[in-house]
Amino acid sequence: MKASKAQFNRFIKSFFEMMKREKRYQWSLIGSFVLFVLTLALPIWKILPMASVSPFIPLHYNVLFGIDRFGPWYAIFWIPGLGFASLIANTVLSTFVYHQEKFMSTLLMIGSLFVQLTLLCSMTLIVLVNL
């Protein structure tokens, strides 16, 4: 129990050390979190009011076949869930790797930013299909 608590304290200390020293890390973490919040807020704003009208909504659009996947309204929240899991995983991995490879740590956080941007684009397109 003592070793795991010490490891957790070392992890937290390393995280805050990175936040103080690395501006790229700060901005990519803040940007990723803002994009995650936008990805979460968009379906709450546009899809949830429609949930009482239609229990199933289009979840995927294909250029060749049109709308090819329908699902329950709550399935739209898999995308923000995936984004949150990616944000947490990249932040934890980046913090663990920070003392050995600072460049890899920065790449993980910038990668998280691009993942969040891609998920926001896909969420925007899904919401536009539903309008």
Image (tube, helix red, strand yellow):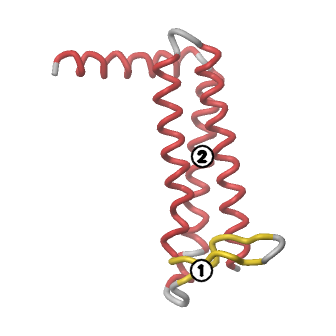
* Residue 107 screen position, x and y as percent: 65, 25
* Residue 18 screen position, x and y as percent: 52, 18
- Report the residue at 53% width, 17% height from top: 20
Q: Name the quadrant of the C terminus.
A: bottom right
Decide: few, some or many residues near mark 2? Use Cα within 10 Å; few <14, some 14-19, many ≥20.
some
Residue highlighted by disc 2: 34
Residue highlighted by disc 1: 57
Real-space CA distance between mark 1 and mark 2, rounded to the nearest whole angstrom: 26 Å
> Which residue type carries mark 1?
Ile
36 or 1: nearer the eye? 1
107 or 67: nearer the eye? 67
Q: Secondary structure at mark 1?
A: strand
Q: Secondary structure at mark 2?
A: helix
* Extreme-bottom residue of the structure: 53
- Report the residue at 66% width, 62% height from top: 123
Is 129 displayed left or right of 78 in the figure? right
Callout count: 2
> Which residue type carries mark 2?
Val
* Residue 31 screen position, x and y as percent: 63, 39
Do the residues bearing badges 1 and 2 touch, measured as CB atoms within 8 Å? Answer: no
> Would you place residue 28 above or below residue 61 in this image?
above
Is 127 displayed left or right of 98 in the figure? right
